[in-house]
Each structure stands twice: as structure tokens, then as C-alpha cells.
Image (cartoon, helix red, strand yellow):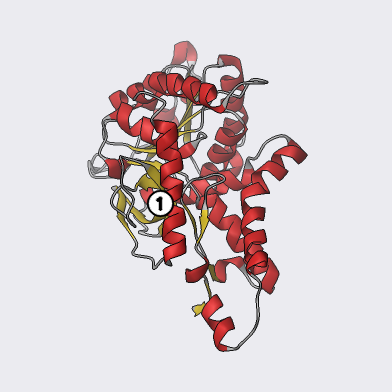
Amino acid sequence: MQKSASSSSLGPGGLDIAQAFFKSIQKTAPPSPTKRHTKISVIGAGNVGMAIAQTILTQDLVDELALVDAIPDKLRGEMLDLQHAAAFLPRTNILASVDYAVTAGSDLCIVTAGARQNPGESRLNLLQRNVALFSRIVPPLAKYSPDAILLIVSNPVDVLTYVAWKLSGFPSNRVIGSGTNLDSSRFRFLIADHLDANAQDVQAYIVGEHGDSSVALWSSISIGGVPVLSFLERQQIPYEKETLEKIHKEVVESAYEVISLKGYTSWAIGYSVASLARTLLRDQRRIHPVSVLAKGFYGIRGGDVFLSLPAQLGRSGVLGVTNVHLTEEEAQKLRDSAKTILEVQSQLGI
């Protein structure tokens, strides 16, 4: 399954009429071999995958977008639906196939595919099924795009990012999980909402596991460059720790609330992943809290583990982890979060 046939072959017997329609000027040269052609592949054409694809298209991030899914009819339908919007979008070549060969030469491969939990199924059994699924997804991606960056969105994202790293054989800087990038956006929104400020002026991170053991870095929150908690203390303005914990709890439960109301999450994760794609492919060197190989940071030991830390991202993937100051309580919670993930990984036998 590929892109619909080009209209340039509308002539008799499939004759290419483009050459007749557009006449070449004189003394031309072939296109520069250094001209950059950017390609992203999205694996999984579900609600999340298509929200990511649609956001990437509207933000004009790629020259070519490849979609892969196991259900051919749905996949072709999604491809055609996007292609039919061509008059309203930046020019992008959109491909789709159940064959991973369509992803060849990708700069960025975004994996959203994942098994759904069956009624009464344990989290461990679900995870093992997702590991089996990844064993069919990741090796072909590595084969067809050996220089790509892998961006994992499927949940549980931290463990599956570790799995993708192991299966791909890629260096750790080129395997990233979407992690708490969206959690941190939710966090910034809630803080801004409490203070009647713009979320873009709020600097705040959620780190650790993308899940229940995530850690809110209250000590480093700032608004317009002003550290919030130290400002309150200097001004002798009282605040309750329970209020802070309530905001963090809202962040953790945000996705569950959206799922209970509309059945799934899509738009926020679409924008979150598109922002990561922009930073990576355009070498923006912005800092995002994403799932990276965290061993050795903040006293995290005991094995290779991926969890979210504020990381500088660019064209080669993870450029480094920022040295954010953590209180001892925050650092201990982060180590506990790493321990939680490692305990799950130890049951996978990878």
C-alpha cells in the first residue's frame, strides 16, 4: 500500500505529462546532493498515532511521512483522509503500508503501537505482550533506518523505551521515550491556572516514571524567572504542602480523567510529540523532560533504567541531561521511582 498514483501519469498509456506541463528553463543544474530531505515514520495508526501525524503535518515538520499499522483497511483510510487535505497543508509526501520497508531512510521513527489491556489481565502480562509486539516492530525499524532516532510513545513508556533500546542496538542517545513531557505541560498548566499566569512563562518539571511514582520538582519551579517557593518564603506568604501534593495528584490523574470522559487521549500527546520532533529534527537544543538512560544521575544505580529527566535534545538525539538542583527529598523520590521501574524490568527477562 503506497501513496495514490500521481496525476502526472494521466496521459495516454500512463504517459508522464508533467514534463509537458512544466517546461525547463535553460542552463539548469541537478538538485544539490546536500539538500536535506526529512522523513518521519509513525508506527500505529490509532487515535494517538494519527493525532501525532496530523500535528506533524500542520506544523510543516517533514517532507515525507510514512504510516505503518497492522490493519490495512484502516491504514489506507487514514492515509487517504490526510492526502485529501493536501490543498490545506504544507506539501508532504504521505505513504502508508503494513510493510516496514516504507519506513526506509527515516530520520525519526515514532512508535505508538501497543496491546490493549484485556479485562482481568495483569499489568505484567500486558507488558509481556507489548514486549512481544516490540520484538516485531523495533528490529525492522533499525534495519531500514539504521541512523534514525527512535521516539517511544507506547505505554508503559519507560520500560518500553528500555526494551526498544535493547532490541534496536542503537546508542542510548538515539532512543528516547516521550516520558513526562506531557505531564510537565499539564503541571505548568495547573500552576499557571492557580496563579492566573501564562503556562509558557512557567518553568516546571515532572520527572521519574511516567506514572504513579513520578516526582514533581517543586524546588525548581519559577515563573518569569522568579523561583516560586523561595519567593513565598522570603515574602513570608504561607502555603500548604497538601496544596502542592494535590496539584501533583491532578497531574497524575489527568490522563485517567480524559480517558473516562472521551475514551482516550490524543490531542495533547499529539502536540507534545510534535514539539519533540521539532526540537530533534531542527536541532533546537531545547530542554524537555523525556525518558532517557538515567543510570548514574542523581544517585540512580542498580541497572540500566530509562526514566524522565530534563534533557537537552538536538539532531543527534539526547545531547545531555541538565544539572537541575534537587532537594534530598526529591532525589530520594526519583531513586525510588527508578527502583519501581527496575523491579518491573527484572520480570521481563531481557
Comparing 100 with 13, the one in front is: 100
Question: Dot 1: few (<14), some (14–19), or many (≥20) neighbours within 10 Å?
Answer: some
Regarding mark 1 in the picture, which secondary structure is present there? helix
The reply to whether residue 81 is in sight is: yes
Which residue occupies 53% across, 49% down? 272
Comparing 330 with 150, the one in front is: 330
| Residue indicated by mark 1 | 335
Query: Can you give x and y, in whole percent of width and height, for residue 231 in the image?
Result: 55, 83
Query: Can you give x and y, in whole percent of width and height, for residue 28 in the image?
Result: 25, 43
Which residue occupies 64% across, 84% down? 237
Left or right side of 175 for 95 = right
Query: Can you give x and y, in whole percent of width and height, for residue 131 in the image?
Result: 43, 23
Q: Is residue 159 above or below residue 227?
A: above
Q: Residue furthest bottom?
A: 235
Q: Residue furthest right?
A: 261
Which residue occupies 28% across, 51% down? 296
Query: Can you give x and y, in whole percent of width and height, for residue 315 in the image?
Result: 31, 49
The reply to whether residue 59 is in sight is: no
Q: Quadrant of residue 312?
A: bottom left
Q: Is residue 30 above or below residue 114?
A: below
Instruction: Say what amino acid the circle numbered 1 marks.
Output: Arg
Left or right side of 254 for 296 = left
Which residue occupies 36% across, 23% down? 349
Comparing 55 with 339, the one in front is: 339
